[in-house]
Image (cartoon, helix red, strand yellow):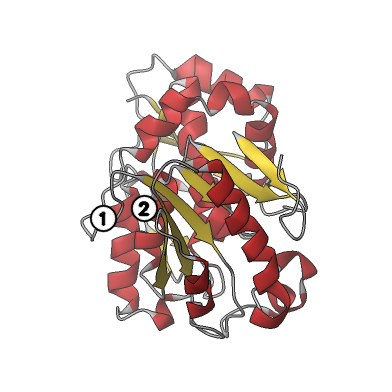
Amino acid sequence: MSVCLTLSNKVSDDSWKKKIPLIDGFGTEGIGSMLQYHLLLSFFADFIGVGFTYPGSDNFAHHSYTEYSKEEYFRMIDSFFNFPNINGCWDEVHMVSEINDNLMTLINDNKSSDRNILINLHDCHRSLASLCAQYVNEIFTKERIDKIRNNLSFSGNKYFDDNINISLHIRTANPNDIPAEIVSTYREKYIFEKDFYRYKNLVNFLKKNTKGNKATLHIHSQGFTTNFEEFFELKEEDFDIKLHIDDHPISDIYHMVNADLLVMSNSSFSWLSSLLNSNQKIVRDNFINGPFVHNFLKANYDYSQIS
């Protein structure tokens, strides 16, 4: 190891040679909105052939509706993603605020150095996402996606069978949502009276495209406003439906990234999962929770047109 990248909104200094500060979610940001950028950095670092380190999670939102303490919740997140966490060995710490030719020169000039060099991409979250979108086909190859996904560490119940497994992520109103999320029309949060018909159209599409095979639709969501039992009326002999309501988010992510087909919601949690799934995705045509999706079909509002 000579050059290693990290991403932080904190200003780095010489104290980082011994320990990099934890990534702070400020009590409002969840797994998707925080870890999407660090996952992107792991892909980018692998693409250019340098190291990557993630110092650990702190103060992420949404632990309150799990059975775990804050500390246990954060440890489970870090253990699951299994990112490299390298501390106490840096000879030099550099901070850059732009991803440009100067950064690449710094990296290339030090790739063969006998010194361990940490580069903090300070507040480069959006520019990193834009760069990955620009080179999505080169960075997000099936081989790289599968390699990084296979580095996940999950010891929970793995409930997929040997048939076709489809993951559907549905967002519902959440008391922990920040005001901007509550009023956003792009979230399309599930309300039975106005939305169930949309998902009936989706299920009909899925049944048509899995005809002749056994398939299971796994619904991942939270039970703040509904228990989703209305979906059971759509079950058939060869098309099962299983609910995973209020499961630990790590379990949801594990299965969403391993699904044969991932139907995404308009959320960063879905987008994070899509980055680690090399199979096909279905995404709404108004998706704005990430700058790109790879290997996808677009769906209109009521899922009557998917292509």
Horizontally, residue 294 falls left or right of residue 90, namely right
Q: Residue at x 47, y 75 (%)?
A: 62
Circle 1 residues within 10 Å: few <14, some 14–19, many ≥20 = few
Horizontally, residue 20 falls left or right of residue 24, namely left
Q: Quadrant of the C terminus?
A: top right
Amino acid of disc 2:
Tyr
Q: Nearer the viewer, residue 287 or 144?
A: 287
Residue 302 rendering spot, x and y as whole percentages = 75, 60
Res 244 seen here: yes
Q: Nearer the viewer, residue 191 or 50?
A: 191
Q: Quadrant of the N terminus?
A: top left
Q: Nearer the viewer, residue 59 or 193?
A: 193
Circle 2 residues within 10 Å: few <14, some 14–19, many ≥20 = many
Amino acid of disc 1:
Lys
**Which quarter of the picture shows residue 138?**
top right
Label annotation for residue 254: 2
Q: Residue at x 49, y 23 (%)?
A: 47
Label annotation for residue 228: none
Residue 221 rendering spot, x and y as whole percentages = 49, 70
Query: How many callouts does the rendering have?
Result: 2
Q: Which residue is mark 1?
A: 158
Residue 291 rendering spot, x and y as whole percentages = 70, 43
Distance from the alpha carbon under mark 2 to that under mark 1:
8 Å
Q: Residue at x 51, y 22 (%)?
A: 107
Proximity of marks 2 and 1: CB atoms separated by less than 8 Å: yes
What secondary structure is found at the residue carrying circle 1?
Answer: loop
What secondary structure is found at the residue carrying circle 2?
Answer: helix
* Of marks 2 and 1, the one in the foreground: 1
